[in-house]
Image (tube, rainbow, N blue to C red):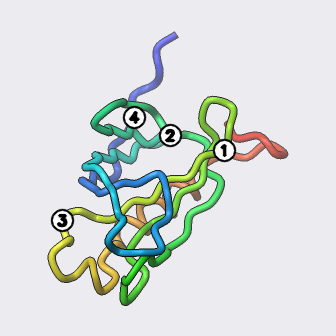
């Protein structure tokens, strides 16, 4: 059965990482596209594309030598296990991002989180 049409709410080009970094020099991240739709987030990473649906936690965090929180930590259920990813708005990487420039990205994640439907412990 085909999925119902989805409204596109936000689109971001972001840096992403699958781990937290305590030292600035050890950061390794990749360019990722995030498309926020009604029921899921389409994630386009260099090696894979997937739909993120089961968002458990969203936080604004800082890593390494950051002055302010500028990464969005997303914890979600994927393929039966809990995973976490860190995203930073790539459009503001020059100066604004070092000073906390991922607020719009954080807001997009929080709005998506509010649209999820919970039935007990399960997400629909």
The answer to whether the residue labelled 1 contacts the one labelled 2, judged by CB atoms less than 8 Å apart, is no
Residue sitting at the far left: 94
Q: Secondary structure at mark 3?
A: helix
Q: Secondary structure at mark 4?
A: loop
> Tag on residue 91?
3
**Nearer to us: label 4 or label 1:** 1
Nearer to us: label 1 or label 2 = 1
Residue at mark 2 = 52
Asked which secondary structure carries label 2, the reply is: strand
Q: Earlier in the sequence, mark 2 or mark 3?
A: 2
**Where is 41 relative to 106, above or below?**
above
Q: Is residue 11 above or below residue 72?
A: above
Give the SS element for disc 1.
Answer: strand
Q: Which residue is mark 1?
A: 82
Residue 105, how many percent across, how many down? 37, 65
Q: CA distance from mark 3 to mark 1?
A: 28 Å
Nearest to the observer: residue 112 or residue 86: 86
Any mark on residue 6, and which?
A: 4
């Amino acid at each position: 059965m085909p999925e119902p049409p989805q409204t596109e709410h936000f689109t971001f080009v972001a840096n992403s990482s699958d781990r937290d970094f305590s030292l600035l020099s050890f950061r390794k991240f990749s360019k990722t596209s995030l498309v926020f739709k009604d029921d899921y987030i389409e994630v386009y990473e260099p090696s894979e594309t997937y739909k993120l649906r089961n968002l458990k936690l969203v936080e604004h965090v800082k890593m390494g030598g950051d002055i302010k929180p500028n990464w969005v930590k997303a914890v979600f259920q994927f393929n039966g296990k809990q995973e976490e990813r860190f995203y930073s708005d790539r459009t503001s990487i020059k100066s604004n991002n070092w000073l906390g420039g991922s607020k719009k990205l954080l807001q997009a994640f929080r709005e998506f989180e509010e649209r999820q439907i919970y039935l007990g412990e399960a997400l629909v």
